[in-house]
Amino acid sequence: MADESQHLSEIMLKHNRIANMQVVFTDIEKYSMRRTQAQISVIDALTQCMKKALSLVSKKYIDYSQSRGLNFQSDIISLATGDGAATVFTFDGLHDIHLSFALKLLEAAQSLRDKDTCAKFNQEGWCNCHPYFNLRIGISEGKGIVFKDLREQYNVAGGVMNMAARIMGLGDSNQIMFTQEAYNQIVDMVDDPHFVDLFAEFADIEIKHNAKIKVYQFVDQSLSFLSSDPPEGLTLKKRAKALMDKMQAAGFPIIPNGISPVERTRFVEIMEGMVDSVTQLVKNARPTITVQAQEIEEDRANKNCDN
């Protein structure tokens, strides 16, 4: 058992349990498709990768922790979430620690997969023969509540946790998604004018209770363990919105509710083709229509002159 955290105890006693938090929410993709024994192996592998990532992050910020009397082993809150984990940092001034940890975690998972090639995993993204896994990661920042649960362990609650989980669900394998507040904080504080170029923005993303938010994907083509491809779901939503705008303008029906992602993708593709075809037909017909209109006007003018 880790030593009692003086840092977290101080938040509880002196700050009314409120702290600014950076939350890294991780989820094992296709975890439930594995057999129980394989799930156990995967969870154990994730735990080891997290320990490795936290150890590397602790070394990176050793000067910070020593100057403030911190102990990252006990002061970082790690919570199991069934098929993933939430890691919570409550340190002022470490504006990129959440991203550093997320990258180290993805790199550790990639190192594990590199030990032995598995055709099944490479094709399907899961297998029962190796403890390999892909992760989706969501990062949020904001105020949260630190408390002790029924087992007297430190725990966290608040919207900052919920947002990390929600935007995590918007990403694909080995991608890192940021909330707008987390994005604003890190790009404002990192001393690199080109750092902002490492983020892709997705606007008007609808989440629970019909709320619309902006989310940001961290992208870096130089990192082999990080997927910088656009998330398929967000790309489809962007296409669907553009399509609905075109469809409504042209008098077509909007995309029906209650259909599966596969059906929605196919529907979008079909309707995009229809809209593009109609648009092209209209463009091709415009010169002819214009010429005919000019001819009609000329005939009218000639008739008026004859009269």
Image (tube, rainbow, N blue to C red):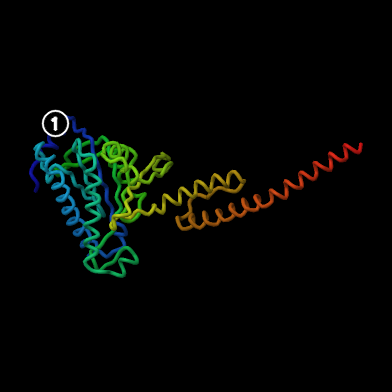
Indicate left or right for 176 with 294 as reference.
left
Q: Position of residue 76 (x, y in %)?
A: 16, 43
* Closer to the camera in the image, 148 or 206: 206
* Closer to the camera in the image, 261 or 102: 102
Q: Amino acid at mark 1?
A: Leu
Residue at the spot of label 1: 13
Q: Residue at x 55, y 57 (%)?
A: 270
Q: Is residue 41 above or below residue 229?
A: below
Q: Is residue 222 above or below residue 129?
A: above
Indicate left or right for 197 with 279 as reference.
left
* Closer to the camera in the image, 49 or 187: 187
Instruction: Count neighbours of disc 1 (C-alpha within 10 A) and say few if under 14, some if 14 to 19, many if 20 or more.
Output: few
Q: Position of residue 258 (x, y in %)?
A: 48, 51
Q: Quadrant of residue 215?
A: top left
Q: Position of residue 146 (x, y in %)?
A: 19, 37
Indicate left or right for 76 with 255 as reference.
left
SS assignment at label 1? helix
Query: How many numbered circles are shown?
Result: 1
Indicate left or right for 287 with 121 as reference.
right
Q: Residue at x 61, y 55 (%)?
A: 277
Q: Quadrant of residue 46?
A: bottom left
The furthest residue to the right: 307
Q: Residue at x 42, y 49 (%)?
A: 234
Q: Quadrant of the C terminus?
A: top right
Q: Position of residue 166 (x, y in %)?
A: 34, 45
Q: Is residue 208 above or below residue 42?
A: above
